[in-house]
Image (cartoon, rainbow, N blue to C red):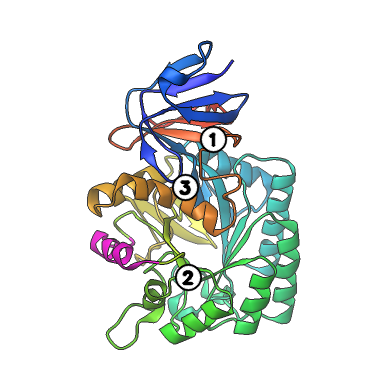
Amino acid sequence: MADLYHGADIFDGTRLGPGALLVEDGRIAAILSPDAAPADARRIALDGGVLAPGFVDLQLNGGGGVMFNDAPDVATLQRIAEAHARLGSLALLPTLITDTPDQTRAAVAAVEAAVAAGIPGIAGLHLEGPHLSLARKGAHDPALIRPMEREDLAFLLDAATRLPCLLLTVAPESVTNTQIATLAGAGIVVSLGHTDATSATCRAAARAGAHMATHLFNAMSQLGNREPGLVGAVLADGALSAGLIADGIHVHPEAMATALRAKTGPGAIFLVTDAMAPAGSDITHFTLNGREIRRENGRLTLADGTLAGADLDMARAIRVLCDDVGQPLDRALAMATSIPARIVGLDDRHGSLIAGSDADFIHLSGSLHLKGVWRKGIALASTSG
């Protein structure tokens, strides 16, 4: 029997408007008028709000009380994925921040095994470091940051053959443009971040094959009157995309609005949570590379006050974009679904509600709070209200 979800607007990944969602055998059958539904469809009435694809998060470091860096294995990935699914994120790139070569190898092996085992939500891997700039290290351990060597390049090229999607954050100071070109040629999505490089250096890296920037405005050279930095390069180069932590803490709403007005071209700004272990849990502190991270008033910080990831979920990021930044709802939803899926090549499976695709979708209330989450047409046991 088919299920017809009605009573909410529908965002299909591109357009937002009235309609009803028909689901059959765990797949999207159609978006249609409720009056056009099959007579035998089971009707599920929703109390307003909007149905949208499950969120696609390309940068998250933990969830459910655990960090990927602490235990890069399948059990950790499953726990993280389950925590984020309850928050509406149904396609994830778990992110390993700068760590030892052994931990990095373990992370690749864990994601490969999780994908082979069919762990729901694990769509690939994001390696954020260790080839970064000490000048913009943020919460990364400076003792582990280093330039890319021949062995590192060979390892990454091999990893790309084993994973469905590999996103790599590097600083131009720690890699060469030849290395970037080789990585991109192998299908790795190269992102610039944790860098103090000039705009010209960053744009040269983009010409070599870098595709995006990691957490726009944070841990990067800033837009200045004489030197535009990576921020300026992202806004000037139509081909560069960028992730954005829209919690109102990492980036001021006015800065977000300015960037969104300025960004044109095939590249686009999209949402990431940069979530850590507290996501989907009530823990108040945890450790990262042996250092305590404190959770307080919506912030995650080291003891010295340095921001260390974000205490954020996608629904709240959408509320910030709409309520504080003044973005239309359809753009905010696209930034959490279809845009990130397209940028890393996951759009054939995630980020849109199209006939034949898995029925992975969410329900947001009129106030943009998460009301329900479905994976392959089955409601998850626990959703936020």
Q: Main secondary structure of the magenta part?
A: helix
Q: Which quarter of the rendering shows the N terminus? A: top right
Quadrant of residue 205 in the image?
Answer: bottom right
Callout in the foreground (1, 2): 2
Q: Is residue 3 above or below residue 70?
A: above
Q: Point out the residue furthest to the bottom here.
A: 226
Give the distance between the C-alpha atoms of the residues marked 3 and 1, in whole angstroms: 11 Å
Among numbered discs 1 and 2, the one appearing first in the sequence:
2
Residue shown at 23% from the left, 62% from the top = 254
Q: Nearer the viewer, residue 237 or 321?
A: 237
From the image, tell me which residue sits under label 2. 239
Callout in the foreground (3, 2): 2
Kind of residue sitting beneath label 3: Thr
The numbered mark at residue 360 is 1
Residue shown at 48% from the left, 21% from the top = 4
Q: Is residue 62 above or below residue 143?
A: above
Q: Is residue 45 above or below residue 351?
A: above
Residue 248 x %, y %: 29, 56
The numbered mark at residue 337 is 3
- The residues colored magenta run 250-264
